Every structure is written in C-alpha cells, then in structure tokens.
Image (spheres, rainbow, N blue to C red):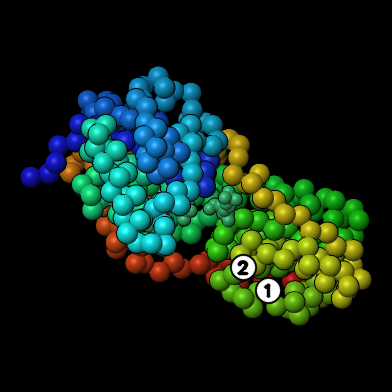
Amino acid sequence: MAKEIKTIGILTSGGDAQGMNAAIRAAARSAMNRGVSVKGIMQGYSGLLKNEIVDLNAVSVGNIIHHGGTVLYTARCPEFIDPDPEKADAAIRKAADVAKSHGIDGLVVIGGDGSWKGAQKLSKYGINVVGIPGTIDLDIACTDYTIGFDSAVNIALEAVIRLRDTSGSHFRCSVLEVMGRHCGEIALWAGMCGGADAILIPEEPESANLENVLKVINENRARGKKHNIIVVSEGIGHSQELAKAIEAETGIESRATILGHVQRGGIPTARDIKHATMMGAYAVDLLLSGANNRVIAYRDAKYVDYDIDEALAMKRRPSFDILEVNHRVSTYR
Ligand code: ADP
Ligand code: F6P
C-alpha cells in the first residue's frame, strides 16, 4: 500500500531561476488545501543537513508568485557529491534522517538534473521525492521546458536588442556571452530572435570556428551591413579574446559583453509562472498518490512524469534546427 503523506517538504537547489517562487507557492498551497502540512527547507540540501527547516502556511507563500529568486534560498551542497562515496552516502543518509525528524515523508525538489540526482539518492532512504525542472539553462533531456528559461532568454534577447543600437551607431561588432553552462539553448534562442550574425554553442564546436565566424562577418559587411552581433554561449566562453580576434582580423572595432547573473533575476515571465504553477500542483498530486522517485516534465505540450532513473538516462536533443535556420537567415545575397 502507498505510504500516506501527511507532511511534505519543499526545497530549491542549484542555481536560482525565475519562477521558483511560483512553484513553491503552488506546491505549498495545493498540499495545504488537501490537509497536508508543509515545511520549507532553506538553502537546498545544505539547509536540510543543517536542519534549517521552517513551517510554511498559506500566508507565508503569499505575495511571492511574481518575484524572482527563491524565498527558500538555494545552494549547491558539496557534501552530497563528496568524491569519497562513503562520505557522500553518509551525508545523504543524514539529510534523510533530518527530514524524517520533521515528519517529512514527501519532498518536492525544484532544481536542475544535478538536484534531481540528490533527490534520487534521498528516495533510497525512505523519502518520497518528486523533482520539478527549475533552471534557466533548458539543459534537461526529458523536458521541453525548464522553469526560468523564458525569463532568462528574454533578458538575453533584450541585451542583444540594446547592443544592436549601440553597435549600429558605431559600426561595431558586438560579442555577447550568455549563460547556459554546457548548454547552448539560451544562446540559440536569444541569438536567433535577436538576429545575430552567428551563434556559438558548445554542442556544435564547428559553430565556434573563427574562420566561419569571420566569413559571416565579412560577407555581411560586404553586402552593406553596418554592425554585427555574435552570440556566444558560456560553454564556448573566451568572448573577450574572440572580440579581439575579430577586430584584429577584420579591422572592425569589436566589443565583448558578458551578461552574467543579470539573466537570473527579475520578474518571471507569464510562461515561467504558468509552468511553475502547473508543475508545483502536479508534484503534490504525484506525492499524494503515493508516487516516489519521479520527476515532472513538459513534453509535447503536456505535463508528464518519469521515473528519475529513466529521466536521467535520456539524451538531450539540442536545438540544432535553430542554428541551421539562423545561419540561413543571418546572411543574404
Ligand atoms: P542543478 O540542480 O541546477 O543541475 P547542480 O548540478 O549544481 O545544479 O546540483 C545542485 C546540487 O545537487 C549539488 O550541489 C549537489 O548537492 C546535488 N547533486 C548534484 N549532483 C549530484 C549527484 N550526482 N549525487 C547527489 N547529489 C548531487
Ligand atoms: O545553472 C544556471 C547557471 O546560471 C548556469 O547558466 C551557469 O553556468 C551557472 O548557473 C552559474 O553558477 P553560479 O551562480 O554558481 O555562478
């Protein structure tokens, strides 16, 4: 028989992402409305290890839906990934014991696939877990959407649009580096939507071939273009060096901008709040139905759930179509 869930815990883990608060609110309120107590675990797994756990009520999760960041704070917890497997296991066991000492029998983990791996291990120590995809990077294989991506990509797009004004005024080339860790989705979306001459992503090393980048810049200038925008994913990096190389090779004045953490802040977009709210409520439905070791995904326009092991084994499909189409439309005859 499925374990009866009387108390759930909620935590946010890894990098914060716009929309995490909306997910916290949705999970907390939908649990409370079904007679389940809700605890907020501060600073992810680190707070769990340090016993930093507070009671949440309907009011304490009020007025947060539209705020960036996470009211539960977040952290990366090195103890869970200690290179000594025995030490890592001891930390995970301790975290499960702390959760149990608060009566927590179900846990909602809002974070990326690293955070999901922590959840997967906690589930082996008797805590029913459900993961929600929360990361600006859109780097999780099983889902077409991760909470925070839309907000981050629109900030990156706005940066491209602003750079076009100043680049165009000075006949310059602007190199914009955006976040994404090992994943190029933010660069792809912001680059294509901003009309970039070229987009450089780690999943396609050839996209960062200097000769190719110079060719596009030179061809576009020859056809009368007065400025250039190159969007670089942080997995490629070296944007300052790239700007210098472009200037040295083409004679076009070039500037690099590294956008950084500004992409992780501010008001979440409606898309992020909507997905966060739907997934927060879904997570509680799953836990109360007795589910364990599951993650939520948005796939083919539907909310679905997978076994964590199955989800983590999936292979991500980068949006190479964006790269290909951008190449076709960023040059002209
Ligand atoms: P994200 O959740 O955004 O992918 P990280 O990869 O930094 O971010 O993971 C967040 C935290 O999740 C880590 O600091 C660690 O505590 C935990 N975690 C990551 N990978 C593992 C793992 N393989 N096993 C256990 N816990 C992990
Ligand atoms: O995973 C989100 C993210 O912003 C990545 O895009 C980036 O590589 C990383 O986190 C930055 O981490 P930190 O906030 O620790 O500098």
Quadrant field for ligand 1: bottom left
- Residue 43 versus residue 235 in the image, above or below: above
Residue 230 coordinates in the image, percent (x, y)? 74, 64
Q: On screen, 282 above or below 63? A: below
Residue linked to disc 2: 201
Residue density around tag 2, few if under 14, some if 14–19, many if 20 or more, within 10 Å: many
Q: Is residue 167 above or below residue 214?
A: above
Q: Viewed as shown, does residue 101 lie left or right of 205?
A: left
Between the C-alphas of marks 2 and 1, the distance is: 7 Å
Does residue 113 appear in the picture of this structure?
A: no
Q: Is mark 1 within 8 Å of ligand 2?
A: no
Q: Which residue is mark 1?
A: 208
Is label 2 within 8 A of ligand 2 (CB to nearest ligand atom)? Answer: no
Task: Judge from the rendering whether residue 230 lies leftward or rightward of residue 255; answer left or right.
Answer: left
- Residue 52 in the image: above or below residue 130: above
Dot 1, crowdedness within 10 Å: few (<14), some or many (≥20)?
some
Query: Left or right: 325 with respect to 257?
Result: left
Task: Report the residue at 29% width, 38% height from top.
Answer: 98
Residue at horizontal 27 percent and vertical 57 percent from the top: 307
Residue at 36%, 56% in the rendered image: 88
Give me the residue at 74% from left, 63% from top: 239
Q: Secondary structure at mark 1?
A: helix
Labelled pair 2, 1 in contact (Cβ < 8 Å): yes
Picture coordinates of residue 112, whole percent (x, y): 44, 52
- The x, y position of residue 145, in whole percent, is 45, 53
Residue 33, percent from left and from top: 27, 25
